Image (spheres, rainbow, N blue to C red):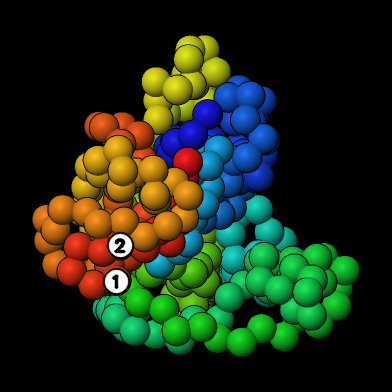
Amino acid sequence: MNGLLIIDKPGGMTSHDVVNRVRRIAGEQSVGHLGTLDPMATGVLPLLLGRFTRLAQFFSTADKTYTGHIRFGFATDTYDAEGQPQGIAVTPSLTLDQLRVAAAPFHGEIEQMPPAFSAKKIGGKPAYKLAREGKPVELKPKTIQIHEFEITGLDDDTASFRIQVSAGGYIRSVAHELGQALGCGAHLNSLRRTQAGAFTIAQAHTLDAVASSNAEQFLIHPRKLLPEMPSVCGDAIAVGKLRNGAQANLPEYSDAEQIKVFDGQRDLVAIARRIAGTLFQPTVVLG
């Protein structure tokens, strides 16, 4: 089975757990996710199946949008509700206006320190394994873009929020650092990814729904993938060349440097790069 499937990930499962479940449901061993969600988190988890796993490189820079809750009063070692409390718990007295003022600096290009309990590699070993072993975790800050961070409400010690970040951003770190800025400690209490790149929660399906029917019917139409690239239908000669990794002449529908080449309406043959004029070279061949 070849395609892209969007799962509404349930809480309590790792992203790899979801991948394994879809492998069994679809009868397809080649399955990969496009951006890890922590076990606690729910929401949009796009999966590539079969030959479409070759397209993963084109999704690596997609922005992500989340909603969730931050609890104030104490931090945790994992920066979320599944970790161990750190320091002395306090009863914060915060207003919505105070929170919004404190959240304002978390916007635009910032340097963010990943959590010690993360999948970042240190000497080839995931940081979370070192942290669990009580070993020092020396991570470097990463430059990310926060396009939007809005505190949408406050109920006692817990604030609701919406955030849009670039690839690689940790919402747990935002919650932790916001608690530091306010001097009361904080951690991420819940998280739901509502959008990943062009894909939204409205397009997502539960694992139970996919398991109870023909999984293929839930795949995103191939022409909706990578919307920044124009779709071109090749003739039999061009398609044959591209399938064999050779250059081919294609109708010049736009000035785009990369295009999606189809044989008919649904059969995505290749991603091709313009060499000159209407001459294209396949960079990824899908068969």
Residue, disc 1? 275
Secondary structure beneath label 1: strand
Residue sitting at 25 percent across and 32 percent down? 265
Residue sitting at 42 percent across and 57 percent down? 246
254 sits left or right of 193 in the view: left
Say if residue 68 shows up in the picture: no
Q: Amino acid at mark 2?
A: Phe
- Furthest residue in direction left, as rendered: 253
Camera-side residue of 207 and 181: 207
Rendered image: mark on residue 207: none
Would you call the spot at circle 1 few (<14 residues within 10 Å), some (14-19), or many (20 or more)?
A: some
Q: Position of residue 151 (x, y in %)?
A: 29, 63
Would you call the spot at circle 2 few (<14 residues within 10 Å), some (14-19), or many (20 or more)?
A: many
Secondary structure beneath label 2: strand
Rendered image: mark on residue 280: 2
Q: Are marks 2 and 1 in contact (CB under 8 Å)?
A: yes
Q: Amino acid at mark 1?
A: Ile
